[in-house]
Amino acid sequence: MFSYEATLKRLYGLQRFGIKLGLETVSALLSELGNPQRRFHALHVAGTNGKGSVAAMTASILQAAGVRVGLYTSPHFLDFCERIKIQGIDVPHDRVADLFARVQALPSFLVQPTFFEVATVMAFQYFAEEKVDIAVVEVGMGGRFDATNVCHSLGTIITNVSFDHERYLGSSLPDIAFEKAGIIKRRVPVVVGPAERDVYTVLQERAQHENAPLIAFGKEFLCVSHHAGSFDVTGTRAEYLNLRCSLEGRHQAVNAACSVVALESSVMPHFSISERVIRRGLESVSWPGRLERLQRRPLIFCDGAHNPAAAECLKSHLQGLLEEQSGRRLIVVIGMMQDKNLPAFLNALVPLADGVILTQIEHPRSAPVLALKRALPVVDVPVYERESPQTAIDLATRLAEEDDLVCVTGSLFLVGHVKSLMTGLTYEPVVG
């Protein structure tokens, strides 16, 4: 068995095989392990934005209810082990090395599986060995051909549908919705967040085809936010008043509603989950890198937004923070992956800023600073170029005065790196 460091080098080396949508390879690997994914129930979460937050909330509530729960998400923030958790605890380094060694020894490994396929197999094997009751599984991309779509679903959630990964999922919202609808299983309840009419139609047709009960936001369940930060959820079983969530941002209220209603429809028939447990789970959930505050004066926070819809959501939050204090300036530090819609993302955020710092993520697929600069809208504010996250955040802290606001965004890999620089936590770079 290799060391953890050597395992990561080999695991990240699988990225050379790129993204291959399909279930044949992951199914073959799991079959050779005895199909561990059949030894636990899963709540399967898809969506363009918010699926990670919903997954984290759902796992937190289940844990508060005394359910032995696994959580599989991507990408990681600081360390690969964050992707695979049981009871909120990352998979240990030695288990990662052991799991990878066993997967690498399988006959189907010779067909060159992708990084995500192998990570998914490792997660499912770990959950089966550790006898989780339920695993909350976040889709990596799309849904229909995502490696996670072999899990044994107890319930499914589709948070929303907007533009991202168009190269793989399609160039229209109905096309993207069709791919995400692929996680809907026969007679398995599906909770759907806010959706445009043409998107909802696609999801509804798939649910009807699978005879899956569809529970839609604005129809079967509702959410009302209050100015004080609390919110009400009208679910299918009960009404929950004045809920609060530890995650910052008004949009998290809708995510929380999706989580609560998914538990109502899929889990409550099998496990006891009280309103008190729901409140405790939402109030204690942790999901780093999403509107996370790193420093108070100046206020520095990070957000892993990386597509146009997430940028608009972040913009709304930033506007609220700017309105809180007269004369407050906004400095934005941005680094992105090269396959993202750079112009649309930058057009949403940059006009709000008083200063922009462009940098390059430490990742094989990162967009160079020059590409970001070319995608910038025309703005009458200073634009700085820095080749590393370290020099970028150093500049931001020099430029910002005590009452100003610094936002680090564009990718979770960037915000993870910056958080490590500011907190001293170890950052594990992704190598090609």
Image (cartoon, grey):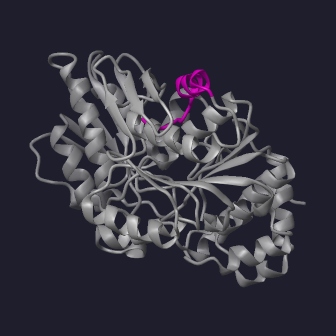
**Is there any visible trace of residue 356 in the rendered image?**
yes
Residue at the spot 59% in from the left edge and 48% down from the top edge: 76
Q: Position of residue 105 (x, y in %)?
A: 87, 73
Residue 350 among magenta residues: no
Residue at 38 percent across and 61 percent down: it is: 367
Q: Which range of residues does the magenta coloring cover?
A: 274-290
Closer to the camera in the image, 391 or 413: 413
The reply, left or right, for residue 417 in relation to residue 40 is left
Residue 4, percent across and down?
80, 52
Residue at 32% in and 70% down: 174
The quarter of the image holding the C terminus is: bottom right
Instruction: Determine which quarter of the picture holds residue 344.
Output: bottom left
Is 246 situated left or right of 407 in this image? right
Residue in the foreground of this view, choosing between 209 and 366: 209
Residue 275 lies within the magenta run: yes
Query: Residue shown at 22%/60% (left/top)?
Result: 375
Q: Nearer the viewer, residue 206 or 34?
A: 206
Residue with the most extreme right position: 1
Is residue 393 something that shows in the picture? Answer: no
Q: Is residue 40 above or below residue 396?
A: below
State the image coordinates of residue 197 (x, y, percent, origin top left).
Answer: 25, 61
Residue 354: give x, y in percent of width and height: 18, 34
Q: Is residue 261 left or right of residue 330?
A: right
Looking at this view, name the residue that lies furthest to the bottom.
111
